[in-house]
Image: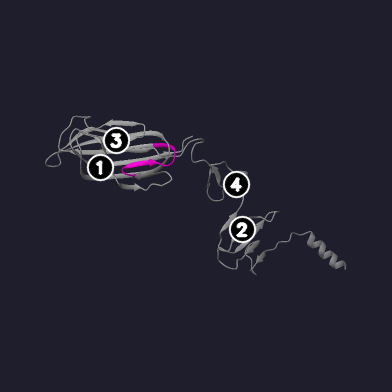
């Protein structure tokens, strides 16, 4: 009896270490759990709260599911912040990509046209024919039809256009013109005329670029037009839209 008591006293006064294995006889960690399969439909570990609602689950294929906030170094971060790594053996930190209260700018649409052989009429404003879509349009932002963009989402639109007009007639500077049109606003840019002697007969080019920023509402339309005293052809045209949320 005294021997048994002495043995218990020795055990109590010493630290006891052990390893626990679930589904394994030879655990390689303090606690090792071996799953029964490699599927995403069965769980290897589930932790529930006092209301028996799941808060953590680890599936047999390694998928990890949780309900709650990520709080590295006691920081849950702020709305709109992202979790950034600080390298090996360091907890990640929450940071904002954009300055506080700033708006992100998105490229939402781009359409281009090159070497349109059709003639554009002299001494009249012509809507530019352009159809080679380079950045597809999300229908929640708008639609493209009949060489016009129709707004689906209200916001701030950054409209950029570039145009090269070609003709066999030399023109004075600023005789050819470019303008961006919306429902209630016109922005007109006169073009710079440059002469090219690369072909025979000589072809003259008028180049124009324009950009405008507008607050547009659902249903508003955007297009662009060009004017020249002489009949002309389209060498190239680019129509590009960027978008930011309005306040």
Checking the image for residue 57, the label placed there is: 2
Residue 184: image location, x then y, percent: 36, 32
Q: Depth-wise, is mark 2 or mark 1 nearer the camera?
A: 1
Residue 178 relative to residue 221: left or right: left
- Report the residue at 62% width, 56% height from top: 56
Q: How far across and how far down the image is residue 137, in percent? A: 38, 46
**Residue 72 - label:** 4
Quadrant of residue 233 in the image?
top left
Label 1 SS: strand
First-in-chain label (3 vs 2): 2
- For marks 2 and 1, give the CA distance: 57 Å
Residue drawn at x 25%, y 42% as measured from the top left: 236
Instruction: Kindly state the secondary structure of the residue where label 4 is placed.
Output: helix
* Magenta portion: prevailing SS class: strand
**Residue segment shown in magenta:** 145-157
Label 1 and label 3: CA atoms lie apart by 12 Å
Judge by depth and name the residue closer to the eye, 231 or 111: 231
């Amino acid at each position: 009896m005294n021997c048994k008591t002495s043995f218990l006293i020795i055990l109590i006064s010493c630290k006891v270490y052990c390893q626990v294995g679930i589904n394994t006889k030879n655990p390689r960690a303090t606690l090792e759990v071996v799953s029964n399969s490699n599927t995403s439909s069965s769980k290897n570990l589930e932790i529930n709260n006092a209301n028996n609602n799941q808060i953590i689950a680890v599936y047999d294929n390694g998928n990890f599911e949780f309900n709650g906030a990520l709080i590295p170094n006691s920081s849950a971060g702020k709305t709109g912040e992202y979790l950034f790594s600080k390298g090996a053996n360091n907890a990640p930190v929450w940071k904002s990509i954009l300055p506080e209260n700033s708006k992100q700018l998105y490229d939402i649409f781009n359409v281009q046209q090159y070497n349109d052989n059709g003639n554009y009429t002299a001494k009249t404003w012509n809507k530019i024919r352009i159809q080679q879509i380079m950045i597809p349009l999300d229908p929640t932002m708008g639609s493209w039809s009949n060489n016009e963009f129709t707004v689906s989402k209200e916001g701030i639109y950054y409209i950029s256009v570039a145009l090269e007009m070609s003709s066999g007639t030399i023109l004075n500077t600023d005789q050819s013109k470019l303008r961006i049109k919306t429902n209630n606003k016109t922005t007109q840019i006169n073009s710079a005329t440059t002469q090219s002697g690369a072909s025979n007969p000589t072809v003259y080019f008028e180049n124009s670029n324009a950009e405008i920023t507008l607050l547009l509402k659902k249903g508003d339309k955007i297009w662009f037009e060009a004017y020249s005293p002489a009949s002309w052809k389209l060498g190239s045209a680019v129509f590009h839209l960027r978008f930011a949320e309005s306040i």
